[in-house]
Image (tube, coloured by chain):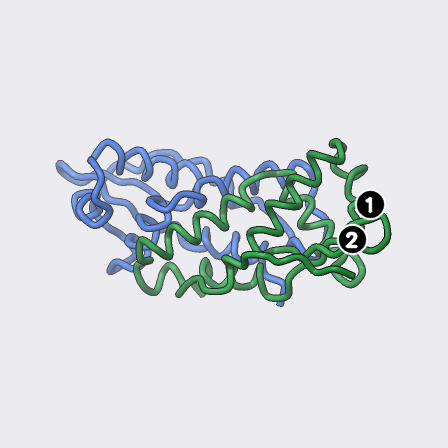
Chain colours: A blue, B green
Amino acid sequence: MIELEVTDVTATCCAPLVRETLSPEDAERLAHTMKALADPTRLRLLSIVAASEGAEACVCDLIEPVGLSQPTVSHHLKVLTEAGFLTRSKRGTWAYFALVPGALDRISDVLVSK
Amino acid sequence: MIELEVTDVTATCCAPLVRETLSPEDAERLAHTMKALADPTRLRLLSIVAASEGAEACVCDLIEPVGLSQPTVSHHLKVLTEAGFLTRSKRGTWAYFALVPGALDRISDVLVSK
């Protein structure tokens, strides 16, 4: 199993929006992460992976549900991986994608006002 | 005080991502909302409004902190208003923007996995 390096931009960001004003640097970082989520196909892919057993799915099982070509699906998965939401590992022929524990929660915590 | 009509796309969206697979329709709606948040200036404006007293701020107090022209700031505030995060009201010369209670929490709830 080969684990590829990822840039986890969700790791360092931020205090809740409603509690204190975001710094320009945090706003840049958070906007970059939000861009990864601002696409319907990526949201569905993330949701399918997250709702799968063990929060992991083979790319071979992700193509049919979203109805797009493998290169397009792979591109979207790469964006989600680079944004720190997924990790990618290769086993045999196929790549497997797993949800990074806590990555979505960190974004959720920034938005929460409760 | 005149309240302008807004399209609250955050009102109807969605079960948590990790619990069940997003439908294509919910993914479209959520991606549209995320796009409003996927910009550093809009995140800062939202944060400044949210962290202000009464979660409300005059547009006249939002221009200097983000260092952009009034038309640009007004454009970003319009995007946030149309996405259902802010309401706009006019008093005298100035427009005031207030955080919509619960709007950020609804997005936060979709992302949470805890």
> Which of the pair A3/B101 is nearer the observer?
B101
Q: Quadrant of residue B55?
A: bottom right
**Decide: marks 2, 1 in contact (CB < 8 A)?**
yes
Q: Residue at x 40, y 43 (%)?
A: A39
Q: Quadrant of residue B4?
A: bottom right
Tag 2 secondary structure: strand
Same chain? Circles 2 and 1:
yes
Q: Chain of mark 2?
A: B
> Which of the pair B67/A78 is nearer the observer?
B67
In the picture, the disc for residue B57 is 2
Q: Chain of mark 1?
A: B
Q: Quadrant of the C terminus of chain B?
A: bottom left
Seen as rendered, the residue at the extreme bottom is: A114
- Left or right relative to B74: residue B26: left
Q: Residue at x 26, y 58 (%)?
A: A52
Q: Quadrant of the N terminus of chain B?
A: bottom right
On the image, the x and y values in percent for residue A99 come to 35, 51
Mark pair 2, 1: CA separation: 7 Å
- Residue type at mark 1 is Asp
Tag 1 secondary structure: helix
Seen as rendered, the residue at the extreme left is: A93
In the picture, the disc for residue B61 is 1
